[in-house]
Amino acid sequence: MNEFRKIGALWYREVLRYWREKSRIISSLILPLLWLLVFGSGMRAIQMPGITNYQMFIFPGILGMSLLFTSIWSGISVIWDREFGFLKEIMVAPVSRTSIVIGKALGSGTSAFIQGFILLPLSFLVGIRLEPLSFALLIPVMILLAIGLVGVGLLIASLMSSMEGFNFIMSLVIMPMFFTSGALFPLTDAPQWLKYFSYINPMTYGVDMLRWATLSSSATVIPVPLEVLVLLAFAAAMIVACSYTFSVKK
């Protein structure tokens, strides 16, 4: 119970930090809206099988993009905590490295989930009508994907010593994950070499599940049970990897 209280304290700190930065919440909405309304409108003439318009197809992908950017960017809190000395205080406190990682991952994952959830009411702009069942399916998928992606951000930040290094590596990770995830185009029509990259990208399984929960089971290209297993394994692997790096990087 003592470890749970420590995890809860770290979770609360991360959520409170996010909630106090109103400019961050607003700015994080601009990029998804540009992709959805500007890019989606420009490509509206593209015909997608079984889907009314292209904007409907990319909406789950833009939702995944919001989770991706917010989750990985949250790793920068590790560098801030290191610079201000807070991380050192946590490391010498009587709390396990795993609890530290879980607390920060849950807090940042909650922030990313809130950011993604804000986009859901915009679905009506592209002709998507979300039913209560859609929300029931989307919420666990978004949380699971966010925790795994937050782990990527924490892992990168734990290995970096400067803000500049984190920003550079983050860009190298985010863009390939986004563009090979099938967020903007169906993987069924992609070249074979691109499919290989997509299937080793955990973001692909998250986007496909978001599309399944948003549009219908007919929109998926990967069996849903396999996607659940991949996302669970991805989140667990990131927690383990981050715990190890936090133990090594004193």
Image (tube, helix red, strand yellow):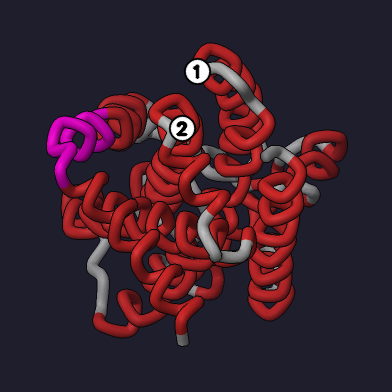
Where, by quadrant of the figure, is residue 121 drawn?
Answer: bottom left
**Magenta region, main secondary structure:** helix
Left or right: 174, with 107 as reference point:
right
Disc 1: which residue: 163
Callout 1: helix, strand or loop? helix
Contact check, label 2 and label 1, Cβ < 8 Å:
yes
Range shown magenta:
20-30
> Which label number is shown at residue 76?
2
Taking the view exactly as shown, the residue that stands out farthest to the bottom is: 1
Density class for disc 1 (Cα within 10 Å; few <14, some 14-19, many ≥20) is few
Residue 168 position within the rendered picture, expressed as x and y whole percent measured from the top left: 59, 16
- In the image, what residue occupies the spot 50% across and 18% down? 163
Residue 1 position within the rendered picture, expressed as x and y whole percent measured from the top left: 46, 87
- In the image, what residue occupies the spot 28% across and 55% down? 15
Q: Nearer the viewer, residue 68 or 225?
A: 68
Q: At label 1, which amino acid type do we have?
A: Met
Q: At label 2, which amino acid type do we have?
A: Ile
Where, by quadrant of the figure, is residue 73 drawn?
Answer: top left
